[in-house]
Image: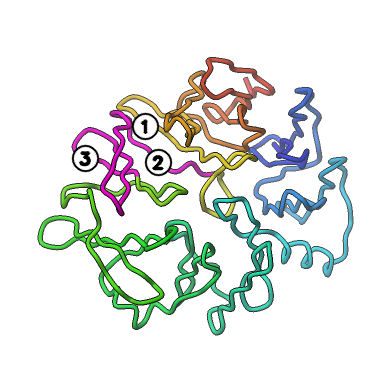
Amino acid sequence: MPGKGLNGRPRLVGAPSVIVDLSSGRVREVEGPLRAYRDTDPALPQYLVRGPGAVILDGRTAEKIRPSKAQVQAALKTAPRWRTPDGRAVLRSGKGFSIAGGARIDLGRWATSHGWPCGLGLRAGGLYVDFSRGRAYPRRGSDLRGFFALIRPGRWLIHRYHGGGVEWGLFDPDTGARAPAQGLSRKDQFVVLHDDGRVFLRRGKRTLLVDPESGAFRDCGRAVVFGAVVPDRFPGPVRTPGGARVYVQQTETHTVLARFDDKTETFHAARAVRSAMLIALLDEERALVLAKGRTVARVRFDSDEYEVLFSLD
Protein backbone atom coordinates (compact mmCIF):
# COMPACT_ATOMS: atom_id res chain seq x y z
CA MET A 1 0.00 0.00 0.00
CA PRO A 2 1.50 3.29 -0.98
CA GLY A 3 1.39 6.04 1.63
CA LYS A 4 2.48 9.62 1.19
CA GLY A 5 6.12 10.53 1.66
CA LEU A 6 7.75 13.60 3.12
CA ASN A 7 6.30 15.98 0.54
CA GLY A 8 2.98 14.21 0.04
CA ARG A 9 4.33 11.74 -2.50
CA PRO A 10 2.89 8.21 -2.51
CA ARG A 11 5.11 5.76 -0.66
CA LEU A 12 4.76 2.01 -1.06
CA VAL A 13 4.36 0.03 2.14
CA GLY A 14 2.99 -3.37 1.12
CA ALA A 15 -0.26 -4.90 -0.10
CA PRO A 16 -3.14 -4.23 -0.60
CA SER A 17 -2.75 -1.07 -2.65
CA VAL A 18 -3.96 2.03 -0.85
CA ILE A 19 -2.79 5.61 -0.49
CA VAL A 20 -2.57 6.99 3.04
CA ASP A 21 -2.78 10.76 3.49
CA LEU A 22 -0.43 11.31 6.42
CA SER A 23 -1.86 14.70 7.32
CA SER A 24 -5.48 13.55 7.62
CA GLY A 25 -5.20 9.78 7.98
CA ARG A 26 -7.65 9.27 5.09
CA VAL A 27 -7.23 6.10 3.07
CA ARG A 28 -8.29 5.39 -0.50
CA GLU A 29 -7.68 2.42 -2.75
CA VAL A 30 -5.72 2.54 -6.00
CA GLU A 31 -5.49 0.05 -8.81
CA GLY A 32 -2.91 -2.65 -8.20
CA PRO A 33 -1.36 -4.78 -7.13
CA LEU A 34 1.69 -2.56 -6.68
CA ARG A 35 4.44 -4.84 -5.42
CA ALA A 36 7.68 -2.93 -5.59
CA TYR A 37 8.81 0.58 -6.31
CA ARG A 38 11.67 2.84 -7.06
CA ASP A 39 11.72 6.25 -5.48
CA THR A 40 12.90 9.53 -6.93
CA ASP A 41 13.96 12.63 -5.08
CA PRO A 42 11.32 14.13 -2.76
CA ALA A 43 11.55 17.38 -4.74
CA LEU A 44 10.36 15.68 -7.92
CA PRO A 45 6.65 15.32 -8.75
CA GLN A 46 6.73 11.78 -10.13
CA TYR A 47 6.87 8.49 -8.31
CA LEU A 48 7.70 5.29 -10.15
CA VAL A 49 5.91 2.11 -9.10
CA ARG A 50 6.91 -1.21 -10.61
CA GLY A 51 4.41 -4.05 -10.48
CA PRO A 52 2.73 -6.02 -13.26
CA GLY A 53 3.35 -2.90 -15.35
CA ALA A 54 5.00 0.46 -14.77
CA VAL A 55 2.83 3.08 -13.10
CA ILE A 56 3.75 6.70 -12.47
CA LEU A 57 1.85 8.56 -9.77
CA ASP A 58 1.86 12.32 -9.41
CA GLY A 59 3.22 13.08 -5.93
CA ARG A 60 0.90 16.04 -5.47
CA THR A 61 -2.36 14.41 -6.56
CA ALA A 62 -1.62 10.65 -6.35
CA GLU A 63 -3.19 10.31 -9.81
CA LYS A 64 -1.69 8.22 -12.60
CA ILE A 65 0.23 10.14 -15.20
CA ARG A 66 1.80 9.10 -18.49
CA PRO A 67 5.19 10.76 -18.89
CA SER A 68 7.39 9.83 -21.80
CA LYS A 69 10.29 7.41 -21.36
CA ALA A 70 12.69 10.32 -21.72
CA GLN A 71 10.93 12.22 -18.93
CA VAL A 72 11.12 9.21 -16.61
CA GLN A 73 14.81 8.70 -17.32
CA ALA A 74 15.48 12.39 -16.79
CA ALA A 75 13.67 12.30 -13.44
CA LEU A 76 15.63 9.27 -12.24
CA LYS A 77 18.93 10.82 -13.30
CA THR A 78 18.24 13.86 -11.13
CA ALA A 79 17.34 11.80 -8.04
CA PRO A 80 19.83 12.38 -5.18
CA ARG A 81 21.84 9.27 -4.36
CA TRP A 82 23.13 10.67 -1.08
CA ARG A 83 23.10 13.67 1.21
CA THR A 84 26.06 15.12 3.07
CA PRO A 85 25.82 15.58 6.88
CA ASP A 86 24.99 19.26 6.35
CA GLY A 87 22.08 18.32 4.07
CA ARG A 88 23.51 19.06 0.63
CA ALA A 89 22.11 16.83 -2.10
CA VAL A 90 24.48 14.58 -4.03
CA LEU A 91 23.27 13.87 -7.58
CA ARG A 92 24.44 11.53 -10.31
CA SER A 93 25.81 13.75 -13.03
CA GLY A 94 27.40 12.50 -16.23
CA LYS A 95 30.20 10.15 -15.22
CA GLY A 96 30.11 10.98 -11.54
CA PHE A 97 28.42 13.07 -8.89
CA SER A 98 27.62 16.72 -8.43
CA ILE A 99 27.23 18.17 -4.96
CA ALA A 100 24.96 21.11 -4.20
CA GLY A 101 27.24 24.12 -4.05
CA GLY A 102 29.20 23.32 -7.19
CA ALA A 103 31.60 20.45 -6.42
CA ARG A 104 31.81 17.65 -9.00
CA ILE A 105 33.33 14.19 -8.59
CA ASP A 106 34.37 12.26 -11.71
CA LEU A 107 34.22 8.45 -11.38
CA GLY A 108 35.88 7.80 -14.73
CA ARG A 109 35.80 4.11 -15.67
CA TRP A 110 33.72 3.40 -12.54
CA ALA A 111 30.89 5.69 -13.64
CA THR A 112 28.41 2.80 -13.93
CA SER A 113 29.08 1.56 -10.40
CA HIS A 114 26.14 2.03 -8.03
CA GLY A 115 28.46 2.35 -5.06
CA TRP A 116 28.01 1.15 -1.51
CA PRO A 117 28.01 3.07 1.79
CA CYS A 118 31.43 3.39 3.34
CA GLY A 119 31.04 5.45 6.48
CA LEU A 120 29.85 8.88 5.32
CA GLY A 121 30.94 8.26 1.75
CA LEU A 122 30.85 5.54 -0.88
CA ARG A 123 32.99 2.77 -2.25
CA ALA A 124 32.36 2.78 -6.01
CA GLY A 125 34.31 0.19 -7.96
CA GLY A 126 37.98 1.01 -7.52
CA LEU A 127 37.32 4.35 -5.83
CA TYR A 128 36.57 5.75 -2.41
CA VAL A 129 34.18 8.71 -2.77
CA ASP A 130 34.47 11.37 -0.05
CA PHE A 131 31.56 13.80 -0.42
CA SER A 132 32.78 16.09 2.37
CA ARG A 133 36.04 16.64 0.49
CA GLY A 134 34.35 16.57 -2.92
CA ARG A 135 36.89 14.05 -4.23
CA ALA A 136 37.29 10.42 -5.27
CA TYR A 137 40.42 8.49 -4.23
CA PRO A 138 41.76 5.33 -5.94
CA ARG A 139 41.60 2.25 -3.73
CA ARG A 140 44.63 0.77 -5.41
CA GLY A 141 47.83 2.25 -4.07
CA SER A 142 46.10 3.72 -1.01
CA ASP A 143 48.06 1.47 1.39
CA LEU A 144 44.78 0.21 2.86
CA ARG A 145 45.07 -3.42 1.78
CA GLY A 146 43.26 -5.57 4.31
CA PHE A 147 41.66 -2.57 6.02
CA PHE A 148 38.06 -1.43 5.88
CA ALA A 149 37.83 2.35 5.50
CA LEU A 150 35.12 4.45 7.10
CA ILE A 151 34.98 7.82 5.34
CA ARG A 152 34.49 10.63 7.85
CA PRO A 153 35.28 14.34 8.27
CA GLY A 154 39.02 14.74 8.68
CA ARG A 155 41.06 11.55 8.67
CA TRP A 156 39.24 8.36 7.80
CA LEU A 157 38.84 5.64 10.42
CA ILE A 158 40.27 2.31 9.28
CA HIS A 159 40.14 -1.09 10.93
CA ARG A 160 40.89 -4.74 10.28
CA TYR A 161 40.74 -8.00 12.20
CA HIS A 162 44.30 -9.05 12.94
CA GLY A 163 45.94 -11.26 15.58
CA GLY A 164 42.71 -12.15 17.36
CA GLY A 165 41.45 -8.58 17.71
CA VAL A 166 40.66 -5.36 15.88
CA GLU A 167 43.44 -3.08 14.71
CA TRP A 168 42.27 0.54 14.48
CA GLY A 169 43.88 3.49 12.75
CA LEU A 170 43.41 6.91 11.16
CA PHE A 171 44.22 7.54 7.51
CA ASP A 172 44.72 10.82 5.66
CA PRO A 173 43.62 10.18 2.05
CA ASP A 174 45.43 13.31 0.80
CA THR A 175 48.87 12.41 2.14
CA GLY A 176 48.57 8.65 2.65
CA ALA A 177 49.77 9.01 6.25
CA ARG A 178 48.48 6.57 8.87
CA ALA A 179 48.33 7.00 12.63
CA PRO A 180 46.89 5.08 15.58
CA ALA A 181 43.27 5.79 16.51
CA GLN A 182 42.71 6.97 20.07
CA GLY A 183 40.34 5.47 22.64
CA LEU A 184 39.68 2.22 20.74
CA SER A 185 40.69 -1.23 21.97
CA ARG A 186 41.28 -4.48 20.13
CA LYS A 187 38.14 -5.98 21.68
CA ASP A 188 35.84 -3.14 20.58
CA GLN A 189 33.26 -3.93 17.90
CA PHE A 190 32.36 -1.27 15.33
CA VAL A 191 28.65 -0.53 14.95
CA VAL A 192 28.02 2.70 13.00
CA LEU A 193 29.69 6.04 12.21
CA HIS A 194 28.03 9.24 13.41
CA ASP A 195 27.86 12.41 11.27
CA ASP A 196 30.53 14.29 13.24
CA GLY A 197 33.06 11.49 12.73
CA ARG A 198 32.67 9.80 16.11
CA VAL A 199 31.94 6.10 16.11
CA PHE A 200 29.36 4.01 17.94
CA LEU A 201 30.91 0.75 19.11
CA ARG A 202 30.29 -2.09 21.52
CA ARG A 203 32.62 -2.57 24.46
CA GLY A 204 31.48 -5.58 26.41
CA LYS A 205 27.78 -5.03 27.10
CA ARG A 206 27.89 -1.25 26.67
CA THR A 207 27.54 1.04 23.66
CA LEU A 208 30.07 3.87 23.52
CA LEU A 209 30.32 6.93 21.27
CA VAL A 210 34.05 7.48 20.76
CA ASP A 211 36.08 10.24 19.12
CA PRO A 212 38.96 8.37 17.43
CA GLU A 213 41.02 11.58 17.22
CA SER A 214 41.06 12.40 20.95
CA GLY A 215 39.88 9.20 22.62
CA ALA A 216 37.04 11.02 24.41
CA PHE A 217 33.91 8.90 24.73
CA ARG A 218 30.34 8.89 26.02
CA ASP A 219 28.60 5.86 27.50
CA CYS A 220 25.29 5.40 25.66
CA GLY A 221 23.92 2.52 27.72
CA ARG A 222 23.31 -1.17 27.17
CA ALA A 223 21.19 -1.01 24.01
CA VAL A 224 22.97 -1.81 20.75
CA VAL A 225 22.81 1.08 18.24
CA PHE A 226 22.39 0.50 14.50
CA GLY A 227 21.85 2.86 11.61
CA ALA A 228 18.18 3.08 10.63
CA VAL A 229 17.20 2.18 7.07
CA VAL A 230 14.25 2.90 4.81
CA PRO A 231 13.54 -0.31 2.83
CA ASP A 232 13.94 -0.10 -0.95
CA ARG A 233 15.74 3.23 -0.72
CA PHE A 234 19.41 3.69 -1.53
CA PRO A 235 21.20 2.74 1.71
CA GLY A 236 22.87 5.49 3.65
CA PRO A 237 22.50 7.64 6.78
CA VAL A 238 18.85 8.31 7.68
CA ARG A 239 18.18 11.85 8.89
CA THR A 240 15.19 13.99 9.82
CA PRO A 241 14.41 16.95 7.52
CA GLY A 242 16.43 19.09 9.94
CA GLY A 243 19.45 16.79 9.72
CA ALA A 244 19.27 14.81 12.99
CA ARG A 245 20.41 11.19 12.64
CA VAL A 246 17.90 8.44 13.38
CA TYR A 247 19.10 5.09 14.69
CA VAL A 248 17.70 1.78 15.86
CA GLN A 249 18.27 0.79 19.48
CA GLN A 250 18.18 -2.94 20.12
CA THR A 251 17.73 -4.60 23.51
CA GLU A 252 17.45 -8.30 24.31
CA THR A 253 13.69 -8.22 23.64
CA HIS A 254 12.92 -5.55 21.05
CA THR A 255 14.06 -2.64 18.88
CA VAL A 256 12.92 0.99 18.80
CA LEU A 257 13.58 3.93 16.51
CA ALA A 258 15.48 6.74 18.21
CA ARG A 259 16.53 10.23 17.16
CA PHE A 260 19.96 11.33 18.40
CA ASP A 261 20.25 14.87 19.75
CA ASP A 262 23.75 16.21 19.10
CA LYS A 263 23.40 19.03 21.63
CA THR A 264 22.54 16.82 24.60
CA GLU A 265 24.12 13.66 23.13
CA THR A 266 21.05 11.65 24.09
CA PHE A 267 18.66 9.31 22.29
CA HIS A 268 14.95 10.09 22.04
CA ALA A 269 13.09 6.86 21.31
CA ALA A 270 9.69 6.36 19.71
CA ARG A 271 8.65 4.12 22.59
CA ALA A 272 5.09 3.42 21.47
CA VAL A 273 6.00 0.93 18.74
CA ARG A 274 8.56 -1.84 19.06
CA SER A 275 10.29 -3.74 16.27
CA ALA A 276 8.61 -1.63 13.57
CA MET A 277 9.87 -0.83 10.07
CA LEU A 278 10.63 2.80 9.28
CA ILE A 279 8.78 4.15 6.25
CA ALA A 280 9.47 7.88 6.41
CA LEU A 281 10.55 10.69 8.74
CA LEU A 282 7.80 13.31 8.66
CA ASP A 283 9.54 16.06 10.64
CA GLU A 284 11.89 16.42 13.61
CA GLU A 285 9.43 14.79 16.01
CA ARG A 286 7.39 12.26 14.03
CA ALA A 287 7.95 9.16 11.93
CA LEU A 288 5.78 6.85 9.87
CA VAL A 289 6.26 3.14 10.60
CA LEU A 290 4.88 -0.24 9.63
CA ALA A 291 4.17 -2.25 12.79
CA LYS A 292 4.01 -6.05 12.69
CA GLY A 293 3.75 -5.86 8.90
CA ARG A 294 0.07 -4.93 9.12
CA THR A 295 -0.39 -1.50 10.67
CA VAL A 296 0.70 1.90 9.35
CA ALA A 297 1.13 4.33 12.22
CA ARG A 298 2.52 7.73 13.12
CA VAL A 299 4.83 7.74 16.13
CA ARG A 300 6.55 10.53 18.01
CA PHE A 301 10.11 10.50 19.32
CA ASP A 302 10.56 10.67 23.07
CA SER A 303 6.90 9.78 23.49
CA ASP A 304 4.43 6.93 23.87
CA GLU A 305 2.17 8.52 21.25
CA TYR A 306 0.90 6.10 18.61
CA GLU A 307 -1.63 7.03 15.93
CA VAL A 308 -2.94 4.24 13.68
CA LEU A 309 -3.52 5.42 10.11
CA PHE A 310 -4.36 2.11 8.51
CA SER A 311 -4.59 -1.51 9.60
CA LEU A 312 -5.07 -4.73 7.68
CA ASP A 313 -6.77 -6.29 10.70
The span picked out in magenta is 200-229
Q: CA distance from mark 2 to mark 1?
A: 8 Å
x 75%, y 53%: residue? 48
Q: Which numbered dot is residue 203?
A: 3
Q: Nearer the viewer, residue 12 or 126?
A: 126
x 71%, y 39%: residue? 6
Question: Does the magenta run of residues contain 78?
Answer: no
Sort mark 2 into few (<14), some (14-19) or many (20+) by Cα contacts within 10 Å: some
Q: Taking 122 as reference, is 295 above or below it? A: above
Q: Quadrant of residue 99?
A: bottom right
Marks 3,2: beta carbons within 8 A:
no
Sort mark 1 into few (<14), some (14-19) or many (20+) by Cα contacts within 10 Å: some
Marks 1,3: beta carbons within 8 A:
no
Residue 35, x across and y down, in percent: 66, 46
* Residue underneath mark 2: 226
x 60%, y 55%: residue? 83
* Residue underneath mark 1: 250
